[in-house]
Amino acid sequence: MSNGTEYIAAANEALREAYEQPMSLAEYVDIILENPRLASHATKYLLEAIESAGTRTVVENGEEKQRYCFFDDPSHDGEHAILGNTESLNAFVDDLRSIAARRGKDEKIIWLHGPTATGKSELKRCLINGLQAYSMTEEGRRYTVEWNISSANTSGGLTYGDEIELAEDDWYESPVQVHPLTVFPRDVRAELLKELNARPGDHIDVVVEGRLDPFCREAYNFLEEKYRREGKHDLFSAITDPKHLRVKNYVVDIGHGVGVLHSEDDGTPKERLVGSWMAGMLRELDSRGRKNPQAFSYDGVLSQGNSVITVVEDAAQHADLLQRLLNVPDESQVKLDKGIGMDIDTQLVIISNPDLEARLNQHAERNDQDPLKALKRRLDKHEFGYLTNLSLEAELVHREVTNERQVWTFKEYDEVGALIRQPVRLQVRGGDRDTVVEKELAPHAIEAAALYSVVTRLDNEDLPAGLTLVDKALLFDQGYLQEGDERRDIDDFEFDPDSHDGERGIPVTFTRDIIADLLNHEQDRYHATLPVEHVIMPRDLLNAMAKGLAEAPVFSAGERAEFENRVVTVKKHIFDQQEQDVLQAIMREKRVDEATVEEYIEHVYAWANDEQIVNARGESVDPDPLKMKIFETEHLGRFDGEDYRSNSPTAPVEDFRREKIITALNRHAWQNRDEDFHVRDVNLKEIPIIKTVLEMHDWDDVKRIYPDFNPRQWDDPATGTETTAVKARTIANMVELFDYSEASAELTSRHVMKEVVHKWD
């Protein structure tokens, strides 16, 4: 788009797609008989909105799970996506399915419970976004009714709120989004629903049990009395004539199908729940000695949320209301006043931090005399915990720092691995208001912060012998541990399903604030040509987080001491990642190409099966023992000349070929090969030992290939030395391969060289 006119045209089109022209009641019935979903009751509608976005496969805590894409907030490009907690979200959807189908849970109030910064409020925003977007689609249309009695009314018109003058041809919409089918008498409606639910295609019946809301009932009763007195034969037709009644669709939003009660909302319980009377309006209306429901405000949370969902946020702040909500799922009714009831169709959801549970259990020792027992029985709790997946926490930290909202999706873990370790570069205003500098969170900095946060959230009581909490975090994230050419899957370990993982730890808000502070201060370091003072290294961030524990009021003394101790293993793991970056950059030009690896594997298979291979000239020849020996000694570095008799392998080499190469390849492809099978058809990186050959190097390789290299000279190598040449190539390769800046590559490589220099002693 290039001009304002085109943006206006796009907005016109968006609204055109969202709204339909009002229709008669008969036309609406024809539409829902064609597509019964359009008449869904509140919980069924919410369920359908969630299911409409489909599912995707994720890995959390080392297990594959199906996740509803709705919770990725696709309608708003992931703005309020909920990261992790897939098991709790799936249980939430299961509850909706049971409630919608009236399978024993229809009296339940869904309770989302957990510590702060675990995604509960994001879920509220995601629900609002998703429901709004769904209601703007053809399959998600939501309908209510509006009335016009101006031609029959001589008493000042039909109205509510504080407006007296009639507007838009005197049509007034139901203030609580009442379902159009509530206009029908109950017995007729029952027959209509019976026919509706007999239509194929859905396992959950549409249920519409309520009556017209009091405002609409006032209009209906007025018209009924008028036309009955006039002796109209087809009374219902007269009342619902298109000049008096229209069915219209509306876009679901806060106050219009979605009710949200915030912690700061005040007023009497009745005002917060349904609304309040307006004395001035009672005087304006013909109330005939009673309270006219047209003078009611209908601005309470249940009124706003009728027809879709009602959310009580920070529920501990509204604990006095919770018991008053019991009759809503039980009886689907609230009262505007002693004599005026209102039927409600809404899905109740309450959101709370742990303080609500403490309040609910304050009388628990009284057993049957506990006054809150009935309420607790109706609450169906779903725990939201801190993220225990490294990739999800890294994504969350990244979102907090950059405000980027795109959800990370991937097919292979290597893809998300690149996202976890990526650097972040931000424009930050300097001390001078006109100065803007670029700050860099170096590669692995976000990863370090995320891993440390996850490690503080993991329970170490069920930690298997030989594993660290970092190992547990990696198992939860990728589902396996890779140690050299040995791979151990999460199924090889036993973790307690009732552990306290995710119940406490460092929240993302703490990490975000630490990063914000670091971005506003220059680091105490200097380089003649590179802006190293603007680079935040992983160790800078980890040190700041560990130091900040003492000043943060959210942690107890015991937690501070425990969390501070856990930073050590995280630093070691992050250093290992940095070390591999430097090694791969040094050895980039010396890596083994896949063609050489394929050739070696083909020779090994021919050797093991006493077969021949076809060479480049098309001749069948025996496998070359010298080629296999050279690969195993020079590229693998597993053996030396003493492990061979001339070029023939000894028993250890033979065992290695069979156990590490042949067995691994069999597992992935060989057993299912056909006559056209070729080693190049296999993803060689799936074979642990080959992955090591292709990607991993050690310092012995560096010593062997660069005999004159001296890591002690790395900071300022002499001109013309091998160290100078190696450093120049290494820095360039780190920039190209791993997206380091020259400054962060310089700092990282210096740090690594200082730690590994002892290997040259």
Image (cartoon, rainbow, N blue to C red):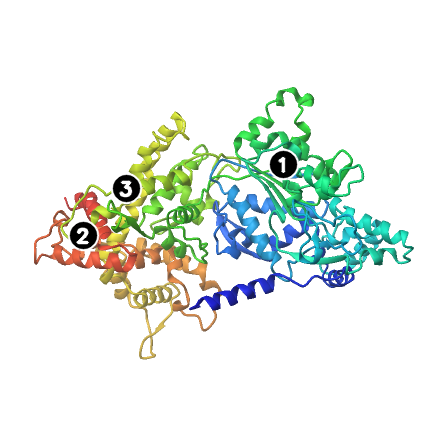
Q: Cβ–Cβ below 8 Å for labels 2 and 3?
A: no
The secondary structure type at the circle numbered 1 is helix
Q: Nearer the viewer, mark 1 or mark 3?
A: 1
Give the residue type that dot 2 points to.
Answer: Leu
- What residue is shown at x 83% (from left), y 55% (from top)? 191
Q: Nearer the viewer, mark 2 or mark 1?
A: 1
Sequence-earlier tag: 2 or 3: 2
**Spatial CA span between label 1 and label 3:** 50 Å
- Name the residue tied to disc 1: 272
- What residue is shown at x 82% (from left), y 48% (from top)? 221
Q: Is residue 384 above or below residue 173?
A: above
Residue 441 makes an appearance in the image: no
Sequence-earlier tag: 2 or 1: 1
In the rendered image, which quarter is residue 738 located in?
bottom left
Residue placed furthest toward the bottom = 617
Tell me the crowding category of disc 2: few under 14, some 14 to 19, or many 20 or more residues within 10 angstroms, Cα based: some
Tell me the crowding category of disc 3: few under 14, some 14 to 19, or many 20 or more residues within 10 angstroms, Cα based: some
Give the residue type that dot 3 points to.
Answer: Arg
Give the residue type that dot 1 points to.
Answer: Arg
- Name the residue tied to disc 3: 539
Residue placed furthest toward the left = 719
**Spatial CA span between label 2 and label 3:** 19 Å
The image's mark for residue 407 is none
Q: Is residue 289 above or below residue 442?
A: above
Tell me the crowding category of disc 1: few under 14, some 14 to 19, or many 20 or more residues within 10 angstroms, Cα based: many
Residue 579 percent location from the top left of the image: 26, 49
The secondary structure type at the circle numbered 3 is helix
- What residue is shown at x 15% (from left), y 48% (from top)? 527
The image's mark for residue 530 is 2
